[in-house]
Amino acid sequence: MQSSPETYLDYLARCEQAFRPFAPIDLPDFFKGRQENIDSLRSELRTAGRQVAIYGERGVGKTSLAALAYFYATFNDETTHVVRCRRDDTYDTIFGQMLSEAGIQYLPNGVETETARAGRIGGGPGSLSRAKTIRSKQRHVLSGRSMSPALLLRYFAEREGLLIIDEYDRVHDAETHTRLAETLKHFSDAASITKIIVVGVAETLTELIGEHESLTRCLAQIKLDRMSAVELGEIIATGEDRIDASFQEDVRRKIIALSDGFPFYTHLLCKYCAEDAGKVLRGNPLAKKVVVSEKEYHRALQRAIRTGEGKLRDDYQAAVITVKRKTDMFKQVLWAVAYSESQEVQVQQIAENVGLLTGQRPGVQGLSNYFGPLTKPEKRNILVRVRQGYYRFANPLMRAYIRLILEEHNLVEANGQLQFPWMRELGVKPEAH
């Protein structure tokens, strides 16, 4: 029989495997839901002349789906190469990294530089030539005047694999968009058996890579929407099986409701709940099955607000803080926007929601002084004015984050008396007091 420390550490390791809010899911068994998207991805990658773009909101699982594409479409993971873009990346740096990932030596202008030694491409035109170094004996070498679709095809066209360009939304260079579009078309026209997957945050394909008519035929679009309650429930059930724990039904429903369709929040709350509940194993290796109750849920909620997502926390704090004249109205406006079930909330609805949350409904005219600052850098552009009289959160994940705060406020300050509409829809019972 294992000692209690070993039992507990093994349990924590399984939690880390089952619930991954901060890293892509790397095992197919734990990627739940999205069956229609998986089927589409498999079909498109196995269709001659098709490349793939995966896009959608933050936190919906785009990177995880792309990372597992090799498995779903039966490609070799050793010939799957991933580059995560930076803001200053260009076409040359992106595909230079890709060549390096694939084991190809790059020497700008035929001269070895510190950049080349680090396996990173230098910007601007260059050439690939044979390196006279011992360590490069096992590396392939291409020669050419500059990075181009033709040069890439010389190596990849007859070599089955995947080239995944992740976080492409960070790239804003127009020339890079144009050259990427040309590359996608060249790979398709050549019926390359290496396929390209472009991944990024966007509402439309045009928003991600620009408008290019030539891509209509060769580029398949897979947009990931938010997950359904059933799909989020599958994440929890799979995790329960893996860690040998059980979430109480009301806790399960609350986590699903607070997730707002984002698997990120389901993984985050489940991870914190499960880790806290598992502490029972530290002193008692013979303890019965770990059970996640309201107690662990409350503590996980506080931990998620405090440590879950740094940028969301920082942006929220910057938006609600006041220096010259103390007021809670910025906070109340954001709470009221998060309270609404609509993504785009009318000013009159915001005023009504403030009244529901505080007991005092402000006038619409009185609120107008707060909307302007909340759409500006001083308040981290936390809100976006969609059209006259309507606002939404700039970052879709912010609504769920503020709902965590509302839930904690309800439990701690309001004695569980507030009845949130998103909780009622999933049949969550009110707290007993």
Image (spheres, rainbow, N blue to C red):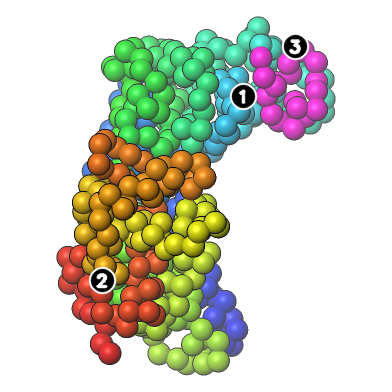
Secondary structure type for disc 1: helix
- Vertical arrangement, residue 256 with respect to residue 293, above or below: above
Give the amino acid at mark 3. Asn
Quadrant in which the C terminus appears: bottom left
Residue 75 at x, y percent in the picture: 43, 36
Residue at the image point whose x is 46% and y is 72% from the top: 302
**Left or right: 173 as drawn, with respect to 188:** right
Q: Magenta segment, which residues?
A: 106-124
Sooner in the amino-acid sequence: mark 2 or mark 3? 3
Q: Which mark is residue 337?
A: none
Describe the element under mark 3 as helix, strand or loop: helix
Find disc 2 in the rendering and name its residue.
Answer: 359
> How many labels sit on residues?
3
What is the magenta segment's predominant secondary structure?
loop
- N-terminal label among 1 and 3: 1
Instruction: Kindly identify which residue carries mark 1.
Output: 93
Residue found at x 39% / y 53%: 398
Q: Residues within 10 Å of mark 2 (few under 14, many from 20)?
A: few
| Residue 329 seen from this side | yes
Please state which amino acid type lies under the numbered disc 1.
Answer: Thr
Report x, y in % for residue 149. 51, 13
The residue to which callout 3 is attached is 109
Q: Is residue 313 visible?
A: no
